[in-house]
Image: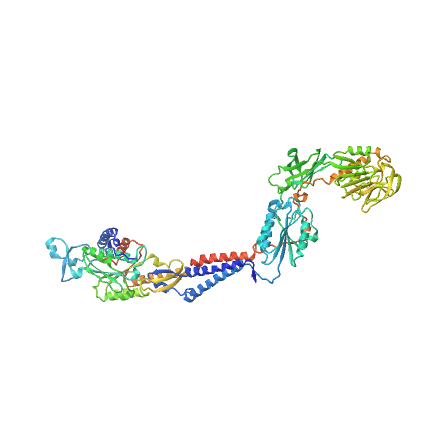
Amino acid sequence: MATTDVDALFGPELLGQLESLALLARRLTTGQMRAERRSTRHGASAEFSGFRPFTTGDDWRAIDWNAYARWRQLVLKLFVEEEDLHVHLLLDCSASMDWGSPVPKYDYARQAMAGLAYLTLANLDRAAVAPIGHPPATPWRPSRGRHRFLPLLRYLAACPTAREGGSLAVAVRRWTATRPRPGVAIFVSDLFGTDAEDATLALDALRHARHEVAVLQIHDPAEAEAGERGEYELEEVESGEHRRVIVDPKVQAAYRHAFAEYQQQIARYCRAHGIALLQVSTGLPVAELLKRSLLEGGFVR
Amino acid sequence: MSFLFPLAWALAALALPVAALYLIRTRPQARRASTLLFWRQLPPQVYNSAFWRRLRRWASLALQLLLLLLLVFALARPGREGAEKAALILVLDGSASMAASGRTEAAQAAARRALAELGPFDEALILQAAETPRILSGWSRNRRALTRALAGAEPASGPGAAAATLALAHDLARQRSSARLLFLTDGVWAELPPATLLEGVALHLVGEGTPPPRNAGLTFFGARRSLAAPGEYQLLARAIATHDTTATLELWCNGRLMDARQLGLKAGEPWQQTWEAHEAGSLAFEARLTDLGPADALPTDNHAATQLGAVRPVAVSVVSEPNLFLEAALASLPAVEVEWRSPADPPPDPARFSIYHRATPPQGATPRALLLLALEAGGPWGEPGGELAQALVSSTREEEPFLRHVALETLRIGKAREFTPGPGALVYAESFGKPLLFGQWSREPRWLVATFGLEEGDLVFRTAFPILLGNLVQTLRAGEEPPPAPLPGEAESLLKPAPEAVQSVATPAPAAAWGGWPLWWWALAAGVLWVVLEWTLFHRRITE
């Protein structure tokens, strides 16, 4: 069962690791791996937001020469619309996420999301959190600055799972209908939809809304297996649907195959559409997951 | 149809818990799943369909109940009432050799198997060929009682009466129309039963195929008083061994060691030794064969005991006028108590040996033994005739024990009386067809008539009469000779099976069906195994 206790969910150990991850993110964006990373880009805008020092990789055309003349220091003049990157963190709140042991997928997703939000805020980008579920919950408006991190954690901890089941694509479309500002949309989900196409339709919806999409697909290790042999009355937590099954070695193998096939289908889709994808099980520590998200790209700019 | 053990049907009540447990355990385990997405993608399987599951469930329950029914049916031991009842006569060899190497236990086990194979209405009877035929159990259908009776089949200490027991078994078999005989034996018989008795008898040989056991033992141990001298006795011990071995024979008399000898026994060759001594009192002898080693098969033939009673005086009543010769002859005999009576006062005690000299016993007198000398009157013993002068003994029955060493042929009898012996009388000595000594001395009541007197002729100068008198007294003691010690005998001690030719007359016992277990035992075992497997595999859902 997912927890609502902010201290239990985001322990001091996780928070301690976030700072070092932020430093890693900064080194990656400014270091030798620059070519692999997306640099911060700032375009022209009427709304001045501030200056920041010129760093390697910045567009030299954005250097404020007047400021240079005054301070003898290369700085960039930042404008709101063009300097802020909107990172939409889409949290799958469907009931299927509230499953797993010892860490439910939902808790794991929120911890990962907290990490991503921290990296975003540390990078002076705007982080927004959108719960995806039925019915839609109140989203976390885009905000910037590290001081917003703690309220964001409280928001995440209090964010409930959806009471009703339903299509993933429909929930995502409902969010895109609010016309969020295009940016990076990181979808943290198990991608278990009503059918095999539901997840890809949801990702289609994100793409069509002109977002750069990244997907963090989480599953519990137990979901990859059919379980021990025997006769079971299965109940789907999301829809309450019942199904009686008899698990034998043949069924175990078929299930394993179906699961792997689904994962590959998602991977093929993402590859085909340039979507960054990370498929992880809850057995992987969150810090490790965040590190991989930085190294493999697509999640932080 | 009826049942030998109808109470077993009470076990049918187990159907209730079986059904209850089945209903409980067939409810599938509830499990929450995050999604059924992948389960829906699985190809449909026949046994996953609701119909198949329902069918399988009820079919499985029905099979279990059927199995329970069959088990209970088997336990109730069904049988057809109208079917012809079989009868079995089990003859267990009870000879001493059956004590060797667990042969009795093997025979009992084979008998139990044979009993277990009987139908519920079949009857059985158990005999044991011990020293005499023993009926361990009469005709009975009760397996438990029959099995209990088997436990009492202890081997005897002597040879088994196989022939007599088989004859009895054949007689008893005639009481039933379809009785069959099964003889459980080791084939070691002191006396080979006639082939006719073995015909139609199923022979189950125990100990067959095992190495022949080794044994050494006493085959005879007996003592007897000397006929010549009442106080003297002779002791005879005989021993034999199946193999070359040494042993020590200890001889004890009245609890004191009398002799100890080292025996070097050769395989199959009897060894024997005689001891002679004089002792008028009662004696208890014991022979112990020791230092035989651990491999001796029969303990019963390593020890023997016998007793010799004290020499009892023979009471003799003499009805005669005083006769010095007769008095001297009787006085020379040891352990004889003599009572003299006049002819007018005959002896009243019939237990005494009565001698009438020139006197006639009273009518109706039947003493233990009667010697009539110089008889003149007739009676049950015969009718007197004319006088016989200067008679010579022409022939005697020398084979008679009481005539041993009695030289009647040397006698000159001055005067005798012709007699026509009574019915049943034997003529022991005669003078050319005229009986001189006749009577009946080989069986009771003993009587002997001498047709001559002691004074006539040269009888008083000869030893014939004193020896005859001594022999007559000794024959009266002969009946008290003790039997030899009960021992298995040579054949049993040698553990030598009867020749195959004799055994082949009998039909071999049928092999135990299904590895020695009756069919219903196998059915029961299979049923139990089935239940365990079904419970383990099906209940744990690993058969699917």
Q: Residue furthest front?
A: B344
Q: Quadrant of the N terminus of chain A?
A: bottom left
Image coordinates for residue B53, horizontal then vertical, percent: 42, 64
Using the rendered image of the protein, determine whether residue B8 is visible from the camera's viewpoint: yes
Out of A176 and B351, give the one closest to the viewer.
B351
Q: Is residue B276 left or right of residue A58?
A: right
Q: Residue furthest left?
A: A70
Out of A58 and B89, give the one closest to the viewer.
B89
Q: Is residue A154 left or right of residue B221?
A: left
**Number of marks in picture:** 0
Out of B93 and A71, give the one closest to the viewer.
B93
At x 21%, y 66%, the residue is: A179
Image coordinates for residue B451, horizontal then vertical, percent: 84, 40
Out of B461 and A273, give the one closest to the viewer.
B461
Q: Quadrant of residue A156?
A: bottom left
Q: What sort of colour scheme is used for the picture?
A: rainbow
B332 w.r.t. A48: above or below: above
Image coordinates for residue B505, horizontal then vertical, percent: 68, 53
Q: Is residue A267 left or right of residue B364?
A: left
Q: Quadrant of residue B513?
A: bottom right
Q: Quadrant of the C terminus of chain A?
A: bottom left
Using the rendered image of the protein, determine whether residue B442 is visible from the camera's viewpoint: no
Q: Quadrant of residue B226?
A: top right
Image coordinates for residue A128, horizontal then vertical, percent: 21, 60
